[in-house]
Structure formats: structure tokens, C-alpha cells
Image: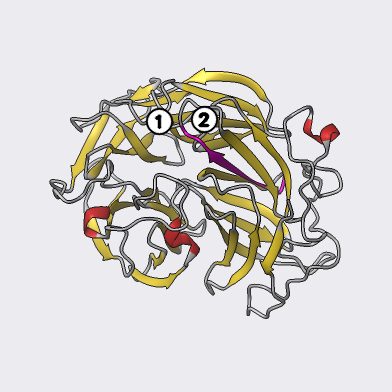
Amino acid sequence: MHIKPILLASALLTGCIDSLTLGGSPPSTDGAVAAAADGGPADAADSGGAVIDAGVTGPGADAGPSTGGDSGFTGALLYVANDDGTLHAYAEGTWIEVGTWSGLPLTDGVRGIDADPQTGNLYMAHGADDDSSNGHLLAWNMGSGSVVYDVAFNHGIDQMGIFAGKIYLAAGEVSSTSTWYILNEADGSQIGTEQGGLAPHNTIARNGHRYEGGRQSNSLVIHGIGAGAVGPSPSSQAGVRPFTVNAAETRVYITWTRYRGYSVGDVATGQIVASVNFGSIPSNYSATAASHGISLSPDGTELWVLDAPYNQVRVYDSSDSPQLRATVSLNSNIFPGNESPCAYDCPRDGWLLHSRDGKYVYVGDSGDVIETASRTVAGHLDALANSRHGFVEVEWTQGVPTGTTTHFGMGY
């Protein structure tokens, strides 16, 4: 298998990218631990015995956004993975697609994504999200543009969270377990498990605490802080859907199965402080989550929540008595429609994610990018129109990845 760049053009993007080249040295990691010492695909020694595809090679030594040497890209890139095995990189603000790679082993379905600037890797869960033995975790190096490892499991996979060299990987929203697998980030090998919500789906890991949402659970399970769970759901049907947490980790904001709206939860007490119901779900809306998208502004002041049946995003303040501040209509609808390319689970549900600087909100399954100041659609990204599980923003400084949003828009 060969990962090749379809597009990685030299370009002049004022205040953003000086140039992009395929030659030269890979971006410096400034002492960060690299997944493979040579910046390329890991071999058996690098993997610590994990199951990998050691034959995968990247397109060159400088496939990342770098000019080589100490000068390189400074700014934010939105990475978007699609089920046809492509990965796309868009520059925030200009929305120019500065990189596209093909041939990644993602054609069985992208189910989760996260990034770690210290390793310089993107991590993508792909394959089955049920009890079958077809789940995989792909580590892809942003600097070399090559696969580090692709671990095959004997269980399903879903959204993940990364903290302190560990990956907390959900077993899958269609699985019959409540298990999150704890993996060694360096090679993807399993080092433990823990129990969260039933039918493990979404994960946030921060400050050593884990927030684990189960597709069949009435409460959000939390490890390491607070009451241990927040709930119950205000919906008549079980299911924790997309959620987020503020910087102080005192409040969580949760969407639910068959509920058009969201709840505010107290981490310390486990109680639901408030629930905001947008109204009944239209009879022609068949997806199980009408508000499958929620993102807290980085400064913690605003909550953006998807209202998919009406192709809108609602903006509330983040208080315990939420007040509606604005409603933004999408230019490119989520409902009705299906993702394409798509391996399975194709109906568009959506996802929301703030850029790390808070200037934009990315709308998965629509492709729209909303400018938060004006509350208007500022751009459209084709790959984002067919992705809800597989996009994340990464911040770069002089050719080195230095920060990430993760897949969940949180307060910082």
C-alpha cells in the first residue's frame, strides 16, 4: 500500500503558508517523542509487537506543511478523513485545500479521530463499531505523511480520547459491552480497560479525567472527577450523544437520543441543571439524534447546538439558565441526505466543532464553515460535507504541530 499526495502544491497564502514542498527535512518535533525515529512508518521494533502494516510508505520526507529548516507553516489546519481512503487538509481562514492524501486504509469506515501534537500523529479509528473483530486504529504522521501503525483488534472501535500517552478507545456504539480499551499510544497495544456507558460511543480525555458516553446509556459516565455520572436523560429513549465540557470541568453539555436540544449537567453532583428542548422532532426525521452536534466556544461563553431537522445551528449562552443568542441557517443542508463516499451508517447526522481560536464553527455532514462573529456561513469544504466522525483541527507553529482541538469543541 502506498500513501500518495494528490495535492500538496507550493502556494503563497498571505499570513498563512509561505510554501509547501515535498522535499527537504521533516518538521522538527522540538524534543517531542516521535512514533518512529526516522519520521516514517514504524517497523516491528517501533511497534512494540503491535499488529501493523509495515509495508506502508509515505510520499516523501516532507509531506507536512513545512518549508524545511526552521521556517514552515504557522496557522491552523482542519484535517478531514473520508471513507474513500482520502485525508484532506484545509487552511483556516483561506479554506484552501493545501494537502490531500489517498490510499489510507479507511475504506471500511472512519469512526473516530484525534491528534497528538507531541507525537505529530493523527489517530483514526476505522472499521466495525459492533461486537465483530473488525476494528482498527490507524496512526498517521502529519510530518512525514505516512502510516506509523494500523492495529487490528478483535473488537469494535469508535471515538477516542488521548491523554498522557494513553488512548481511551470506545468499543463501538452497536456493541453489547460498556468497555473502553486503554491503549499505549506509542504502538496501539492494549494496556487495560475500564467501564463506561453501555454501547461505547464518544470520549473526551482531559486532565486525567475521562468522559464516556454510551449509545444505550441514560447518563454520561465520568472517571476521575465528580459524582461519576451525570443524568438521567430527559428523553424517553436511552442514549448519550455528542457532549462537551467546560475548562473548569464543572459543567457538561449533553445531547441525547431522540431529543431535539441539550442538557446542562453538574459534574460534581451528577445532576441535570437545565434542559433546553427545541420542540418536537418532525415525523419525517428518522435519524436517532436530532441535535447530533454540540460545541462550546473556547472562551466558554457560548454553546452552539445543531438542530438538524431544520438545518440550523442554535447559539446559547453557557449559563445554567440558557438564553438563545442566535439561530444560523446552513447554506448546505444536512437533512435529508447521505454521506458519499460512505462505508456504512450513511445518513447525515452532523457534528459541530469550534476552531481553537473561536473564530469559526465547522459543520460536519454539511461542509459549511460558520464565522462566529457575524453568525454567517464563511465557506464550504467538500470533504467536510461527507464526514462527521473524522475531522479535527491542528495548530502549527513554524512547521511543528503545537496544539489541537480534538474532535470535541471544549472550553479552554
User: Dot 1 surroundings within 10 Å: few (below 14), some, or many (20 or more)?
Assistant: many
* Residue type at numbered disc 2: Gly
Q: Are marks 2 and 1 in contact (CB under 8 Å)?
A: yes
Looking at the image, residue 356 sits to the left or right of residue 189; the answer is left
Looking at the image, residue 397 sits to the left or right of residue 94; the answer is right
Looking at the image, residue 83 sits to the left or right of residue 19; the answer is left
**Picture coordinates of residue 151, whole percent (x, y):** 67, 34
Residue at 32% across / 70% down in the picture? 331
Main secondary structure found in the magenta portion: strand
Inspect this view and state whether residue 164 appears.
no
Q: Which badge, 2 or 1, comes first in the chain's sequence?
A: 2
Is 229 situated above or below 284? above
Is 98 situated above or below 404? below
Residue at 81% across / 61% down in the picture? 60
The stretch of residues the image draws in magenta is 119-129
Say whether residue 202 is magenta: no
Which quarter of the picture shows residue 150? top right
Helix or strand or loop: what does disc 2 sit on? loop
What residue sits right under mark 2 in the picture?
A: 156
* Residue type at numbered disc 1: Val
Mark pair 2, 1: CA separation: 9 Å
User: Dot 2 surroundings within 10 Å: few (below 14), some, or many (20 or more)?
Assistant: many
Q: State the mark number for residue 174.
A: 1
Looking at the image, residue 59 sits to the left or right of residue 172; the answer is right
**Picture coordinates of residue 297, whole percent (x, y):** 41, 53
